[in-house]
Every structure is written in structure tokens, then in C-alpha cells.
Image (spheres, rainbow, N blue to C red):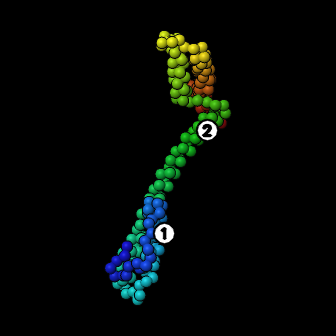
Amino acid sequence: MSNDATPAATPSQPQQPLSPDLASDALLRLAQLDIPAEQRRLKQIKDPTIEALLQEMAGTQLDIIKDMARNQVELRDWAFAALNALAEHVEALDDRMQTIETYGTETTLTPEDAEVFRKAVIGAKWAAVLLLQGPFPIQERDEEGKQKLAEIIAYAEQAEKIIVDTELSLDDDDDDESDEDETED
């Protein structure tokens, strides 16, 4: 960042290898290395002329300000993106809380979630039934293996009942009743 009209930093200060933080973080490097180096260099100028001061302002100092402004814009853009993502998550949580408040505090599944769980349970039950029925490869299934498959089938049947019991019913009749309640209030 130095220019020809001013003396360079003194070579008496040895160059140290940059720490990983300084090497990868432009704003940290600017704050901890570049600006202090420029301050030391500017303090060493004896009897500066108006032209030398103007060159410093137009060159080194405005370059530093430009770097800082660019880093601030990047920080602002990152903050806006992070805040928008958080807002979307909060809105989704708010919608979920609204659903829970509307339909009670018991565990509930949306129809979409219930469908996913239902398919997984049906698939596990189907696989267990096929394995239990055979035909068995080379040797027969042992009794412990058969018992575990029977348990999987029983758990799958329990899970199907839980899914049916906790799935939200979004019938049109419910919506009509809630609309009537709102108009009466």
C-alpha cells in the first residue's frame, strides 16, 4: 500500500509468518497488520509536502477505507442471509405451535409426516413377514430370529395404530366449524 513519494517501512522489523487466522481473515489482517504498519510508516515521514499528503490520502488511506467498506458489505450480506434463514425457521416453528395449540397439546402428526412414517412401518412389516414366511436359505431360521421377526411385526402393527391415532384430521367440516366460531366472536 505504500507509494513512491513516501519512505517504505523500516526493514528492522522482521517479517513473521502469518498465523492461520491472519492468513485467511482479510479484516483481521487489515486490523492487526496492515493498518499498524501504515501508521508506523506515516509516522516516519519527515516534513511531508502537500503533494505527499494528497498521494497518501488518494492511495494508501482510501485503499484501507475501501477494504474496510468491502468487508462491512460482506458482513452485512451474511447477516441479512442469516437473519432471513432464522426468520424462516421461526415462522415454521410458529406454524407448528399454532397447529399444536389448535388441535391440543398431545403429539400430532401432519398428514404428510404420517404418510412418511406409515410407509416406513409398512415396509418394515412387509420385510419381516417375508423373512418369517420363508423360503429359508440353506438352513432354517433359528427360533430367536423368528421371535425377533414376530416382534417387528407386532411393533409395526402398534406403530400403525399410533400413526392413525396421532394424525391430524384436516377435514373440511372442521374448517367450516372454526370459520363459524371466528365469525361469532
Say which of 43 and 109 sits in front: 43
**Residue at x 61%, y 38% (from the top left corner):** 97
On screen, residue 167 above or below 94: above
Q: Earlier in the sequence, mark 1 or mark 2?
A: 1
- Residue 97 is labelled as 2
Q: Is residue 184 visible?
A: no
Query: Residue 161: percent from the left, percent from the top?
Result: 61, 20
Query: Residue 45: percent from the left, percent from the top?
Result: 41, 84
Answer whether labels 1 and 2 touch (C-beta < 8 Å).
no
Say which of 164 and 9 sits in front: 9
Task: Report crowding for label 1: few under 14, some 14 to 19, many 20 or more residues within 10 A (C-alpha).
Answer: few
Distance between mark 1 and mark 2 Cα atoms: 47 Å
Farthest residue, direction right: 105
Q: Quadrant of the N terminus?
A: bottom left
Say which of 42 and 63 sits in front: 42
Callout 1: SS: helix
**Number of the front mark, 1 or 2:** 1
Query: Residue 40: percent from the left, percent from the top?
Result: 45, 79
Say which of 171 and 150 sits in front: 150
* Amino acid type for the residue under numbered disc 1: Gln
On screen, residue 85 above or below 18: above
On screen, residue 147 above or below 58: above
Query: Residue 130: percent from the left, percent from the top?
Result: 51, 14
Task: Report crowding for label 2: few under 14, some 14 to 19, many 20 or more residues within 10 A (C-alpha).
Answer: few
Q: Quadrant of the C terminus?
A: top right
**Residue at x 45%, y 82% (from the top left corner):** 43
Callout 2: SS: helix
Residue at the spot of label 1: 32
